[in-house]
Structures are given as structure tokens and as C-alpha cells.
Amino acid sequence: MFEAFIKDMGLTLGWQMLVAYVLLFSPALIPGILFVHSFRKEPRQFRNALYLLATVLWLVLLLLMRFGQMWTVYVVIVLFALFPVVTCTFLTVNSIIVIRNNGFSLTSLLPIALALFIFLMYCIPIYASQDGLFLEVLPLFFFEGLWFSFTFVALLFYSWLYRILPRHRRYDYIIIHGAGLDGEKPTPLLAGRINRALELWKRQDCCGKFVASGGQGDDEVVTEAQAMRGYLMEHGVSQETILMEDRSRTTWENLKYSQMLMNADAQYQDYTAAMVTSDFHVFRCAEYAHNLGLKADGVGSHTGGWYWPTAFIREFAAITKAHFWPYAVIAALWFIPIFFQLVSCA
């Protein structure tokens, strides 16, 4: 039908092929155009991740529809069946590794919690088919799980893309985000961030100032800012080159208080800034900076592969909390028909 419609248009073969491909790939054009427009306007937005993944998924689907063979369908079925087993096994093993390296904590249980969630998402439809009441709730679980999976993959893909974007400008300020202390010394994670900041500073001929950003935790004897200043001075940085932000307890406060310091130091003139943090944390910092109106690029320091899954899940949870409204909309759309059904039966 599709090919007959194009032939009836009376076009030459070349134009017929062009029109066919335009019509075939047009569903991917809308999210693609939205992504390009939004990315050019501001790359530090979560919506960019959604537009990009939607474009990629549409393109893959359309390519499979146009060029796919029967074996590709079998591959998709096998991958879908293996996904929960492989993923849950990987996440469980990762939790065990994190506990062995960092000790037991709620954070170390995040991979196991995600594995349990994935397991339930696959098991609930099987159980629901045998229970009439549970069958009513199945659409809610399905669409909430679908949105969860879509946003998780979108953030994973886009946060990686954002981190590898080239950074060629010189920065007036380099913000270093705190990451815990070992006594009065930076932890290896924090030391990695400071070393990355030093590398960035030296690359621009030791120009610009550091902003050591981190308050004092309940179990810390000094502020993270003090520990960072000591580390920087041990590596040849003068005290006058370091601004101290020692009040923050969260990422949002890191950026908010650092922005206040930089504004005052720059006498409210325009300036450029970089936010140095662990690579898994870069995109969330960048989005928070955008929300604060702070023009700053995110720069990541290396994180050990064994810790990356746990850290990323925590980042995803924080971003999901900030963008929770789609989950509420899905729940409302599920509940509204049920509500009217109950009212009509009353």
C-alpha cells in the first residue's frame, strides 16, 4: 500500500525513492529536530536525553522495519529474555564488590535494589495474568516501568555524551566539589577530583582561581574546603588563588554558595567557570548549574569501574526526584478511569 501510494504520485524513480525515505524516517525527525534545537540552546537539560534516545529508538525501529530480516526478530526476543538475568546478576555482583571495598551502607545496596525492581517488573505480568484484581494494576506497573527504563537508558547515554564534549575554553574559576574526608585528608575520590582540577588549571598556564566547595559532615573533623585547600597548597597553589566555600552540604548548595563567592570576587562581571567532580556526577551538576543560572561546564574525574554502577544509580535517583511529574501523570491517567467507574457504580 505504501509503495503503491508513492507510485501513484507520478514521480520519477529517483524522486519516488527520496519521498519513500522521507516518509519512512519522518517519525524520527520530530524528536531529532527537538534535540538539535534544545541542545544548541542549552546542552545541560535532561530533556535533551529524552529527545536523543527517542530519535535513536525510532531510527533503529524504522531500519529494522525496512531492512530487517526474520533473524533480527529472533535476536530481539533472545536479548529481551536474557536482559533481566544478565542485568540482575551483574547488579547483584556489583553490590557485593562495593560492600567489600566500601563497607556496608544503603548506597551499596542500590544495585541490588534495582535488580529486585527489574525482577519484579518481569514477574508481575506473569502473576497478574492469574489474578483479576492484580490485572487492573498491570497497566500502571507497565507504563511506570517503561518510563523508568526509558529515562534510565536516556540519562546513561546522554550523560556519557555530555562528558566527552570538547572543552577548549579558559576558565576564570574552577569549582571542586567535595566528596568526603579521611580524617583531615581528602579521600581517594576527592583527591581524584582535585588532581583533575589541577590538571585543568595547569593546562591553561596556571591562570584562574579555585573554589574549594564543601562543608563539614557530622563525622568530619574539618570542612572539606579546608582539606582541599591544604591539598592544593601542597601541590604548589598559592592561598590567594583559592576561594573557600565551606557551608554546603549538598550538590545544590555547592553550586549556589560557589556562585555567590564567584559573583562577589568577579565584582558581578561575566566570568567562565568549570565544575570538577566525578564523571558519574557531571551531568547532574551541569543541570543544577543551569537551573541556578550559572554558566559553567562540567568536567569529570575518573571513577573506578567497580563503583560506577552504584554511583550512577544514585545520580539517576536524584534526577528522577527532580523530574518526578511524569510518574504522577501516568498514575493519574491510570486512576481517572477507575475513579469514574467507581463513581458510576456507586
Image (cartoon, rainbow, N blue to C red):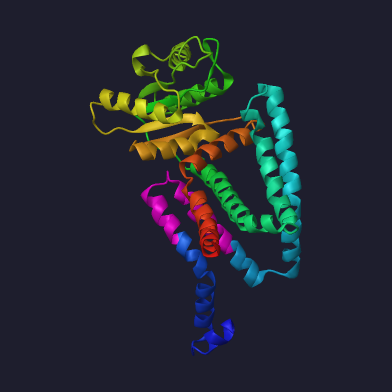
Place residue 101 in its image quadrant.
top right
Count of numbered circles on the image: 0
- Residue in the picture at 64% in, 70% down: 65
Q: Nearer the viewer, residue 49 or 109?
A: 109
Q: Quadrant of the N terminus?
A: bottom right
- Residue in the picture at 53% in, 22% down: 190
Q: Please say whether residue 281 is one of the residues in the magenta stretch.
A: no
| Horizontal side, residue 303 vs residue 132: left or right | left
How far across and how far down the image is residue 324, in percent? 49, 45
| Horizontal side, residue 94 vs residue 314: left or right | right
Q: Nearer the viewer, residue 342 or 171?
A: 342
Vertical position of residue 137 compared to residue 182: above or below? below
- Residue in the picture at 35% in, 36% down: 292
Place residue 265 in its image quadrant.
top left
Vertical position of residue 50 compared to residue 266: above or below? below
How far across and how far down the image is residue 89, in percent? 75, 40
- Residue in the picture at 50% in, 54% down: 332
Q: Please say whether residue 36 is one of the residues in the magenta stretch.
A: yes
The magenta span reads: 33-59
How far across and how far down the image is residue 180, in percent? 53, 19
Residue 207 is at least partly visible in this image: no
| Residue extending farthest front | 346
| Horizontal side, residue 44 vs residue 66: left or right | left
Residue 33 is at least partly visible in this image: yes
Vertical position of residue 5 compared to residue 36: above or below? below
How far across and how far down the image is residue 42, in percent? 38, 47
